Image (cartoon, rainbow, N blue to C red):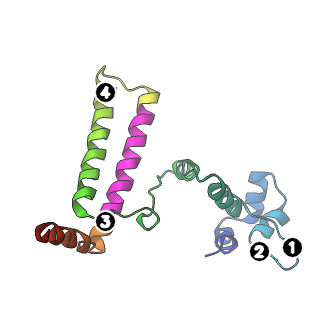
């Protein structure tokens, strides 16, 4: 789905007039966001979704996405199709265990004095996000039946 198509659907439920007033923008600007860009004429208004996408691509910084997700009451987990898949099940399992151990270490250190500071909470959140991403990649490999690499590597070790 293109960004302007999504905005068109959003504006079916959220009145463009209200959005215009809430954002302090003209209603024509809001309507332009939901129109397909006219690349041939070189005109068209870049809508906020396209600009956010361009900013993420330019910076390569996923914290932008995480920030947006947090503002919407959720969290961001990188799609495992965009992250390198572990080739072997055992190293992937070890990585999950290590990430979990790292998270527990941060929690234990933070809770040692029976209180959690804002900085400690940020560290806990960062470790948690990393654990979720690594685990999601592992689960996706499991769902895809990605066990052939493990079997092939084990066979080569026995034969070698």
- Label 3 sits on a secondary structure element that is loop
Name the residue beneath numbered marker 4: 109
User: Which of the 4 quarters of the picture holds residue 31?
Assistant: bottom right
Whole-Å distance between the Cαs marked 4 and 1?
Answer: 56 Å
Q: Residue at x 37, y 45 (%)?
A: 128
- Label 2 sits on a secondary structure element that is loop
Whole-Å distance between the Cαs marked 2 and 1?
Answer: 14 Å
Q: Which residues are magenta?
A: 121-139
Residue 50 drawn at (x, y percent):
69, 64
Q: What number is the disc on residue 87?
A: 3
Any magenta on residue 68? no
Q: Residue at x 31, y 19 (%)?
A: 113
Name the N-terminal-most of marks 3 and 1: 1
Q: Residue at x 86, y 71 (%)?
A: 43
User: Which of the 4 quarters of the picture holds residue 117?
Assistant: top left
Name the N-terminal-most of marks 2 and 1: 2
Location of residue 42 with respect to 18 vertically, above or below: below
Name the residue beneath numbered marker 1: 42
**Mark 2 neighbour density, 10 Å: few (under 14) some (14–19) many (20 or more):** some
User: Which of the 4 quarters of the picture holds residue 33?
Assistant: bottom right
Name the residue beneath numbered marker 2: 35
Q: Residue at x 77, y 74 (%)?
A: 35
Which quarter of the rendered picture does the N terminus lie within?
bottom right
Using the image as rendered, state which of residue 117 and residue 63 is in the foreground. Answer: 63
Q: Are marks 2 and 4 in contact (CB under 8 Å)?
A: no
Name the N-terminal-most of marks 2 and 4: 2
Front tag of 3 and 4: 3
Whole-Å distance between the Cαs marked 3 and 2?
Answer: 43 Å
């Amino acid at each position: 789905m293109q960004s302007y198509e999504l905005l068109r659907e959003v504006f079916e439920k959220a009145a463009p007039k209200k959005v215009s007033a809430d954002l302090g923008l003209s209603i024509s600007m809001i309507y332009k966001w939901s129109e397909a860009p006219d690349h041939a004429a070189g005109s068209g208004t870049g809508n906020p979704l396209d600009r956010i996408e361009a900013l993420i691509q330019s910076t390569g910084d996923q914290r932008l996405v995480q920030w947006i997700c947090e503002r919407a009451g959720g969290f961001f987990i990188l799609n495992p199709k965009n992250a390198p898949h572990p080739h072997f099940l055992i190293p992937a399992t070890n990585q999950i265990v290590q990430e979990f151990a790292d998270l527990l270490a941060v929690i234990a250190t933070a809770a040692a004095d029976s209180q959690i500071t804002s900085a400690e909470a940020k560290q806990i959140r960062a470790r948690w996000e990393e654990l979720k991403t690594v685990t999601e990649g592992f689960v996706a490999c499991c769902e895809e039946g990605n066990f052939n690499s493990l079997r092939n590597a084990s066979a080569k070790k026995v034969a070698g």
